[in-house]
Image (cartoon, rainbow, N blue to C red):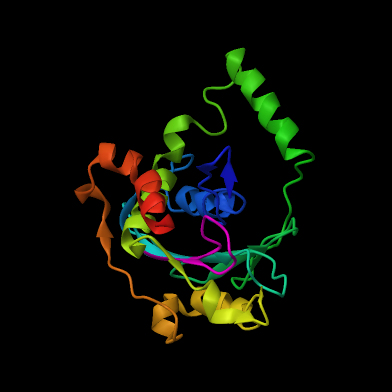
Amino acid sequence: MASDGRPVFDGPATNPLSHWFHNIMYLSGGKLDEFGLPVDVEAELYRVKPIESYDLVCMRGHMDSGASFQYAVTHATEQAVPCKLEVIGSKGRAWIVENSVVAKNNLGLPEQARPCAGPILESWRQFVRFARAQQSRVATRLEDTRGYVLATNAALVSSGGIHDISQTWRRGGSDISHPDLAALVEHSFAEWKMFSEVKVGWTRPCRSIIVRDLPHLEMGVLWRQRLRDSFR
């Protein structure tokens, strides 16, 4: 996508489905109300549709809390598949599916919903309570996004840019989504595998990025530079 001739760095992990990835940062934090930071990241970014940015991504890595994560999402499937967030611990699993208000588990724990009518309005209410010194902190601080920013920037470096695969599925002059793309995303998620490890022909293996080895200033311009290079 572009606005006034300038690339907009939009994609499933960096806007519409970013909150699902940011939830991983929250759930992997070492303490309550603490967001985890990535230690290393592997990622593959692909362009399926003829757009300026990417629309297919898988990511894997480790957090400073010791937790590991796997993330796979896309906007390019013919079949609509709801997002699923799953937490795997030493004693079992718990998960929640998009548009569901109740988290499931295989631990025999009661499945209870915490009512939250109008989450956007509740966010404003929390900010007002914080501004009135009625609560100690806002729901999400700017510093809470640091892990997400580091991980998504490292993802672009790990992938080596955005790999254009739209020509692979061009039929009769019109670009369509691959019918097995949804299955690929689900397989990546379920098996903790990168797309290239599933042995799909058009995939490109990535390299593992140690986040602390990337200068912060450089990471601030990575998306602009890498996407510019991918347009050439």
Q: Is residue 98 magenta?
A: no
Q: How many marks?
A: 0
Q: Position of residue 75 (x, y in %)?
A: 63, 63
Query: From what the image shows, is residue 133 above or below residue 137?
Result: above
Task: Locate the C terminus and report the quarter of the image it occupies.
Answer: bottom left
Q: Residue furthest right?
A: 117
Q: Position of residue 189 (x, y in %)?
A: 52, 73
Residue stretch in magenta = 41-57
Quarter assignment of residue 20: bottom right
Question: Is residue 88 at least partly visible in the picture?
Answer: no
Locate residue 101 relative to residue 175 in the image: left or right: right
What residue appears at the point 51 percent right and 49 percent down from the top-left corner?
A: 22
Q: Position of residue 19 (x, y in %)?
A: 58, 49
What residue appears at the point 28 percent right and 67 percent down from the top-left corner?
A: 207
Locate residue 34 relative to residue 76 in the image: left or right: left
Q: Position of residue 159 (x, y in %)?
A: 36, 64
Query: From what the image shows, is residue 80 above or below residue 51?
Result: below
Q: Residue furthest top?
A: 132
Query: From what the image shows, is residue 183 above or below residue 108?
Result: below
Of residues 181 and 19, the one nearer the viewer is 181
Query: From what the image shows, is residue 146 above or below residue 184?
Result: above
Q: Residue furthest left?
A: 213
What residue appears at the point 57 percent right and 59 percent down from the top-left corner?
A: 51
What residue appears at the point 27 percent right and 36 percent down from the top-left corner?
A: 217
